[in-house]
């Protein structure tokens, strides 16, 4: 059917990696590596205490009979206990390891699981655009109908004399409320937000809660994978922490990958009230049954260790924040220097940049000839609906001609709104300082 057909389109991630591979082969080393400021994953090794914790578990012969076998579906007790100790105070709840947590294969599978657990065919899901593209695909796999509303990027008032920042992405509450009806069952929230770097404030969340009060059947799926990557004075607010009534209907999603720079480990977790966790765990038995036991055992130790002093900082999280703040500042400076007006993020590791000034000399409304050729050779798979998009074609040319990758944000909008991404690109700064500086140099050549 139509939903399934849409799902078999290649994702933006597939095309980007194919283009990068092709560029490497074709340029014969001109850019030994395309600088991947596109797909977001830290490109440095995870911290030594993280790797050491995993090594210790794998080498611990005495405990191997316990750590080498399937875990219970919800997770192993030491990990569940460590998570409850960590999140209880932050969500302002007394969490029970056996009732409030379920471990998943990264946040990706957590999102799929929530959609499977809380949606029936024909139910409706509300998404806020631009959205991480997996939400849409996961909702479609559950045969749900998607309603979405786009954040609007406002220009800062001239009198403010400042750069745009992610606070300028605002949610029109009337438009938001109009997405809801008696069939709505899930609202997906994401803060710090991929791709804008916006962080929702307590006030914004209270306004969202006021709308939800009118729709008691809606479960909130709150994707907080960037919880520890925040800048300046912006404080991460878990939606579940704003009130008892918010907690009662929220599933919060977290991932080790972003926090501990180990995206390949693919371990995530849900925190929610017992009724919502029971429902998710019931479905989880039938999907993965259980998640990698030794990595859960390692993460139990890692999560406790992360609160201890680290590299001259109060704890590991303070260090992480300082590292990412420096990288954000480099990327913002490089983009501004290349005349790609950056929207300074409040959190997460992405910068949206305004590319409106890249003009005329570049034909951006048709597939670049080299890409068409690669497609003909079967080296690149293109989602047909993106062939004429400005942001996609700019990215295609950036990769092949400039040696820099970015993500076309129209991938993160509903079909009806994709034009809103046309003049933007998403750059990620989870890269070495050297790579960020070099990408900035290469982008200068755009003008
Ligand atoms: N949610 C968001 C907002 C993300 O950016 C990502 C990473 N791309 C995920 C979920 C998936 O996380 P994981 O790698 O843990 O599956
Ligand atoms: N979350 C990352 C990003 O948005 C990686 C993409 C993915 O997991 N599919 O770039």
Image: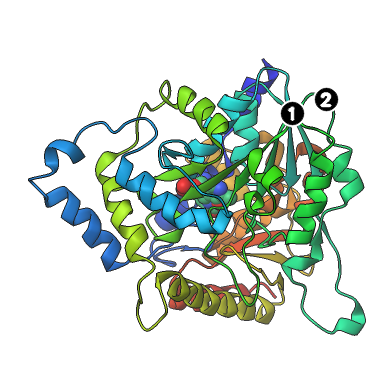
Mark sitting on residue 345: none
Q: Nearer the viewer, residue 13 or 301?
A: 301
Q: Residue at x 34, y 31 (%)?
A: 290
Residue highlighted by disc 1: 217
* Residue sitting at the far left: 61
Q: Residue at x 18, y 55 (%)?
A: 55
Q: Are marks 2 and 1 in contact (CB under 8 Å)?
A: yes
Q: Residue at x 89, y 44 (%)?
A: 175
Q: Nearer the viewer, mark 2 or mark 1?
A: 1
Tell me which corner region of the image, top left, top right, bottom left or bottom right, holds residue 72.
top left
Q: Nearer the viewer, residue 273 or 208?
A: 273
Residue at mark 2 to residue at mark 1: CA–CA distance: 8 Å
Label 2: which secondary element: loop
Color theme of the render: rainbow
Q: Position of residue 336 (x, y in %)?
A: 68, 79
Q: Nearer the viewer, residue 266 or 394?
A: 266
């Amino acid at each position: 059917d139509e939903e399934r057909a849409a799902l078999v389109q290649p994702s933006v991630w597939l095309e980007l990696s194919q283009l990068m591979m092709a560029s490497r082969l074709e340029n014969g080393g001109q850019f030994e590596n395309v600088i991947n400021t596109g797909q977001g994953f830290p490109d440095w090794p995870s911290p030594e205490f993280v790797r050491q914790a995993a090594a210790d578990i794998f080498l611990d012969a005495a405990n191997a009979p316990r750590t080498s076998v399937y875990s219970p579906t919800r997770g192993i007790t030491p990990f569940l206990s460590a998570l409850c100790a960590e999140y209880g105070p932050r969500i302002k709840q007394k969490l029970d390891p056996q009732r409030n947590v379920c471990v998943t294969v990264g946040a990706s599978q957590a999102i799929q699981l929530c959609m499977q657990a809380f949606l029936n065919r024909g139910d409706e899901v509300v998404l806020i655009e631009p959205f991480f593209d997996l939400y849409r695909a996961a909702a479609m796999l559950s045969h749900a109908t998607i309603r979405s509303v786009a954040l609007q990027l406002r220009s800062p008032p001239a009198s403010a004399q400042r750069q745009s920042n992610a606070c300028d992405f605002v949610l029109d509450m009337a438009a938001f409320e109009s997405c809801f009806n008696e069939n709505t069952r899930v609202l997906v929230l994401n803060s710090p937000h991929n791709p804008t770097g916006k962080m929702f404030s307590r006030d914004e969340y209270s306004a969202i809660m006021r709308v939800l009060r009118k729709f008691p059947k809606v479960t909130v799926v709150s994707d907080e994978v960037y919880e520890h990557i925040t800048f300046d004075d912006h404080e991460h607010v878990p939606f579940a922490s704003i009130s008892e009534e918010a907690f009662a209907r929220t599933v919060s999603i977290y991932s080790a990958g972003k926090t501990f720079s180990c995206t390949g480990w693919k371990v995530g977790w849900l925190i929610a009230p017992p009724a919502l966790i029971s429902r998710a765990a019931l479905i989880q038995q039938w999907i993965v049954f259980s998640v990698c036991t030794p990595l859960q055992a390692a993460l139990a130790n890692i999560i406790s260790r992360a609160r201890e002093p680290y590299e001259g900082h109060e704890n590991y999280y303070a260090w992480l924040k300082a590292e990412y703040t420096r990288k954000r500042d480099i990327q913002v400076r490089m983009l501004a220097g290349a005349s790609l007006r950056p929207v300074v993020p409040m959190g997460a590791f992405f910068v949206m940049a305004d590319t409106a000034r890249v003009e005329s000399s570049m034909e951006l409304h048709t597939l670049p000839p080299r890409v068409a050729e690669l497609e003909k050779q079967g080296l690149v798979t293109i989602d047909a609906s993106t062939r004429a998009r400005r942001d996609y074609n700019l990215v295609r040319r950036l990769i092949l001609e400039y040696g820099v990758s970015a993500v076309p944000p129209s991938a993160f909008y509903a079909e009806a709104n994709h034009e809103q991404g046309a003049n933007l690109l998403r750059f990620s700064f989870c890269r070495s300082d050297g790579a960020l500086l070099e990408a900035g140099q290469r982008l200068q050549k755009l003008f």
